[in-house]
Image: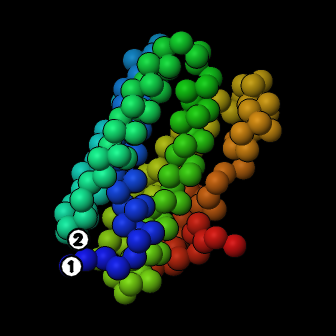
Amino acid sequence: MKLNHPELVDLLKKGYSAEKAAAFAYQGHAAAVKNTEDKIAIRQIEIDEWNHRTEMLEILKHYDISISKFYEFKFHVIGKIISFSCHVIGWFMPFYFAGRLESGNVCEYFRMKQYFNSLGIKDYDIILYEMGMKEKEHEVYFLEQIKDSKLLPFFERLFFWGKDSFNNIDLDKKYSVEESDFYCKKK
């Protein structure tokens, strides 16, 4: 079955490849941190990203969507550069930019769910919801690590993320899969 939704197809291709970049970045981040608990947590986040990539591949295969060589190359390079940079840019920026990235990734999964639903396809609602929520957990973890840093207010003003998220999800007041359609809706 082919998907007649160019935005969804592109988002699926990009999401699949971007998960590799994130996983590579977290390899470097985990290696660069000294705190054992942080190292374990970041390695788990890396595993989550590889799992998301596996789930995305299953969706791509189901709809006979080819993997984008361009996105694979682009995100491979980006992930490796970020991985390396974690060793030289200090402790704050890897946590900050990881949280900022995860904040945006949350909505990619909810947007995929919305696009599928617009085609009458509900088969992926649960997995896309769960992946979006997992990305939100990652965002919250990274923000928690830097919330008391004196650098955070400056970075919030410069990069528009911190106490204000790029998504409207509150993990303490989660809505069910069926009630989650208003998450990440563009205004």
SS class of the residue under badge 2?
loop
Instruction: Decide which of tag 1 and tag 2 comes sooner along the chain.
Output: 1
In this view, the residue in front, 63 or 125, is 63
**On the rendered image, what quadrant is the C terminus found in?**
bottom right
Q: Is residue 101 above or below residue 108?
A: above
Q: Which mark is residue 165?
A: none
Which residue is the extreme one toward the bottom?
120
> How far is mark 1 from mark 2, CA to CA?
5 Å
Residue sitting at x 20%, y 79%: 1
Kindly identify the amino acid type of the residue bearing the numbered disc 1. Answer: Met
- The answer to whether the residue labelled 1 contacts the one labelled 2, judged by CB atoms less than 8 Å apart, is yes
- In this figure, which residue is indicated by the disc labeled 1? 1
SS class of the residue under badge 1?
loop
Residue 120 appears left or right of 133: left
Please state the total of marks drawn on the protein image: 2
Residue sitting at x 40%, y 39%: 74
Residue 25, position as x, y percentages in the image: 42, 30
Q: Is residue 76 above or below residue 101?
A: above
**Residue 128 makes an appearance in the image:** no
Q: Quadrant of residue 150?
A: top right
Residue 58 appears left or right of 168: left
Residue 162 appears left or right of 49: right
Q: Quadrant of residue 109?
A: bottom left
Q: Quadrant of residue 99?
A: top right
Residue 149, position as x, y percentages in the image: 72, 25
- In this figure, which residue is indicated by the disc labeled 2? 63
Kindly identify the amino acid type of the residue bearing the numbered disc 2. Answer: Tyr
Residue sitting at x 47%, y 50%: 135
Residue sitting at x 25%, y 77%: 2
Residue 68, position as x, y percentages in the image: 31, 52
CA neighbours of label 2 inside 10 A, class few (<14), some (14 to 19), many (20+): few
